[in-house]
Amino acid sequence: MDYHFSDRVSKLKPSVIREILKHTSEPGVIPFAAGSPAAEAFPKDAIKAISDSILATDPIGALQYSITEGYTPLRDRLKNEMAKKNCFTEGRDDLIITSGAQQANELACKVLCSDGDTLICEAPSFIGSLNAFKSYNVNIVGVEMEHDGINIEKLEEALKANKRVKLLYLIANFQNPTGNTLSLEKRKAVYELAKKYDFIILEDNPYGDLRFAGEDIPSIKSMDTEGRVIYSRTFSKILAPGLRVGYVSAPAEIISKMVVCKQVADVHTNIWAQQVCDRFMETTDMNEHLASLRKVYRRKFTLMENGIKEHFDPSVKVTEPEGGLFIWATLPESIDMMKFCKVAVEQYKVAVVPGTAFMINETDRTNSFRLNFSTPSDEQIVRGCEILGKLTKEKF
C-alpha cells in the first residue's frame, strides 16, 4: 500500500548524522555524544522517599487526571520563585507546566507561527528544537554566533532581510551545542531589536542553574516590560530528565493558547512527577542542592578541559563554557570533520556529535563537533580525550 503523508510530515527526513550516532548505544562506546545529566547528580534517595510518601498519603491525587495548566501547588511555587528573579509579573504573565522544556518550545512555535512565518535562531542551535520548528513549516533563519552569543549585527541584517519574523529562539546560558553564554550587553541589544522589529523572544534556559564559574547574568525575561519574552525552564538538568517536567512563563494570552494546544497533545504533564518536583523544592535546601550539582559539573568539565589541553593538537579551537554540559570543538580546515567523527566512533569507540547536526540544514558548512562532559565517567573522559587527541594529530 502507498501511504500519503501530510505535507507537514512528508518533508521531515531521517538525519544522515544517524549513521554515526547509531553507534553510540554499542557496548564500550565512550559517550561524548550524549547530553544527559551525570549519574552521580541524581538525588535518587530523595526522589524515592518523596514518591513513597506521595503514594502512601495521596495515591489517587497522583494517579488521577488533572488540569492541563499543571499541579497548582507547583505552579504557585514556581511563580513565586520566578517573580523573585523578575521573570514572572503578576497580572501580566501566567505559567504552565509542560512535558519538558522541549514541549514548551514546540508549543511556542505552534501558537505563534503560521506556515511561512520566519523564526530566527542561533546557528548552530539545539537539534530538538530545530526539528520541532521544522515540523510547523516555518522559515528558519540561522544567525552565526560569537564567543559571547549571537552576532547582533547579523541578527539585525536577518530581521531586515526576512518577512514575517515571529520568533527569535535563544539559549542564552551555556548554549547547546557551543556552551557559549549571551553577554549582558547583547541581551539588552536583543530586547531592543525585539521592540524595534516587533517580534517575540523565546528564551530557553535549561542549563542556567548549572553555572560553575563566573557571575550570573540577568535573563532577557527579567528585562521584559512589553510582554515580548517567553521563558522556558526545566527540572531535567537539576532533578531528573525522566520526570519530563518543564515550565514556561509568558504573557497570559500566549499561555492560554498553549493550554489549548497542550490539551489536544497530552492532556497534562505527569501529575505524580509534578508532585515530586513540588515536594522536592519544598523539602530540599535548593541552594545546597544546586551547589552540589555545580561541584560535580565543575570537576567533570575541568577533567575534560585538562585532557583537551594535554592531548589535542593546538590547532583545534574549543569553547570555554562557565556552566552547562557541553564544549564545542572546531577542527582546522585540513581535517574532514565528518570523517573524523566517523573514524572516532567506528574504529575507536568514542562518540561525538558532528556539528552539522546542529545547523539549520545539514548541508550548512561547519568543521566543529560537540563534546559532552556530564554523561561519561571520569575514566571515560580521560581515555576519550587521549583517543581524540591522537586523532586530531592524524591526517584524514
Image (spheres, rainbow, N blue to C red):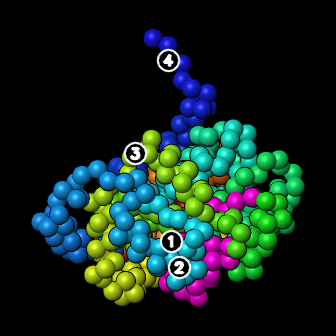
Q: Nearer the viewer, mark 2 or mark 1?
A: 2
Q: Upstream in the sequence, badge 1 or badge 4?
A: 4
Q: Which residue is mark 4?
A: 3
**Residue 288, horizontal then vertical, whole percent:** 36, 88
Q: Amino acid at mark 4?
A: Tyr
Alpha-carbon span between mark 2 and mark 3: 28 Å
Furthest toward the left, the residue is 56
User: At label 3, which amino acid type do we have?
Assistant: Asp
Position of 99 with respect to 217 (left or right) is: left
Of circles 4 and 3, the one toward us is: 3
| Residue hosting label 1 | 207
Query: In the figure, residue 244 lies in which quadrant?
Result: bottom left
How far, Cα to Cα, is label 2 from label 1?
19 Å
Rounded to the nearest angstrom, the CA distance separating label 1 from label 4 is: 41 Å
Cα gap from disc 3 to disc 1, whole angstroms: 25 Å
Q: Residue at x 43, y 82 (%)?
A: 294
Query: Judging from the image, what secondary structure is the residue with disc 3 in?
Result: loop
Residue beneath disc 3: 266
